[in-house]
Amino acid sequence: MTTAAALRSTDAVRERSGELLRRARAGDSAWFTVADDALDRAADVVADVTRSRYPDLDIPFHSRWRHFEAGGVNRTAALEGDPRAMIDVAVVSVLLDAGAGADWSFREECTGQRFSRSEGLAVASWHAFAGGVFSSDPGDPLRADAEGLRSLTVDRLAAAFQVGAGNPLVGLDGRVELLHRLGDAVSAEVFGGRPGGMFDALTVTAQTVYAHDILTLLLDTLSSIWLSDNEIGGEPLGDCWLHPVVGWVPFHKLSQWLTYSLLEPFTWAGVPVVGVDALTGLPEYRNGGLLLDTGVLALREPESARRTWQVGDEPVVEWRALTVALLDELAPLVCARLGAEMPLACVLEGGTWAAGRMLAQRARGGLPPLTVASDGTVF
């Protein structure tokens, strides 16, 4: 196994993240301190938010499908029984889920509701998908295929997302370029010309699918779509960043978010997904912000919060690694308070992400505690 391939695993994510957490606890981090007694406070906050959102504790996985249900609307019923179309829309929608900016929103004509942020991007991408924006076949609109993705124009996506002078969407051109690269990637034989082809690739010889096998397929075949210069021996590393002490630290946040979002299409098609807890917590600014806002983590130099950091900067790499490692410790504390056993995917949904968003809204009007310049493939 090559060094690059070894870094494309959640074992590597946990190993390197755990190493940075041990350093921080020993006082060897130049950027963060860890207050272990604050983990109880964080667990209390997450448990309270979980109970308010899911009083019966019937908690689904943290995935893009929750955003498709924004406003209490079952938008995706038309896809029931078609796992390939479900995968098509999930992949495209996740890749379009970069930050929208503070001034963009989407008005859903059929309900009259207006959505912003991740929910708005999900609802907009669903209606674009239903309208055949990503399909090359007018007679089969409910699909995304290589030709349809590669022929997508900025003007067509702008129209689908209601973008205009009074409703600007951050990074519109970059989103279109990303979908063009997705079109190139799914031209590979394993996909059969569409993202949903991975359903056939993973189920042709198996009655069940391992969550990590979904992630591995994504990392091995879609790595070319990420705009990252990080590589070893010509092999792209994707969301993997060099730390001056511990070396390469992998995260694969967007690929794992996409994997979480593909669990349900397989399950709904009668193919159980096992080993879900092999996936890690997502090292993004809501989960990381939860840890800072509850005092589990603290910046050694508070003025660090007043500058803009790059994704590969040492404090950002450490913040994300500490988030991964501490979410593994936080999850059983939350479960104990709820009196229920559940996978990490449900703790995240219940959960940590919503609690992080709530605390950010209270403290900073929704802004994260650290500002990171990102193209959306990381945060």
Image: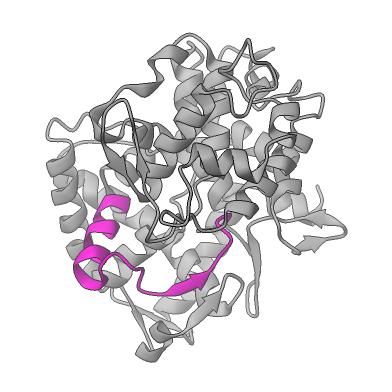
Looking at the picture, does residue 213 appear above or below residue 75? below
Residue 36 visible in rendering: no
Rendered location of residue 262, percent (x, y): 51, 30
Q: Quick check: is 372 in the magenta stretch?
A: yes
Q: Is residue 39 magenta?
A: no
Residue visible at 45% across and 59% down in the picture: 284
Q: Position of residue 193 (x, y in %)?
A: 75, 23
- What residue is drawn where x is 37% and y is 48%? 105
In the drawing, does residue 301 fall left or right of residue 174? left
Can residue 21 be seen by looking at this rendering? yes
Query: Residue shown at 76%/64% (left/top)?
Result: 229
Q: Residue 38 or 357: which is nearer the viewer?
A: 357
Please indicate whether residue 156 sits to the left or right of residue 222 in the image: left
- Front-most of residues 200 and 36: 200
Taking depth in this image into account, of 164 and 19 the one nearest to the observer is 164
Farthest residue, direction front: 165
Position of residue 89 relative to residue 48, above or below, is above
Does 93 appear above or below 6?
A: above
**What range of the chain is rendered magenta?**
353-378
State the scheme by which the image is colored: one colour
Q: Residue furthest right?
A: 233
Q: How many marks on residues?
A: 0
* Residue 278 x %, y %: 50, 40
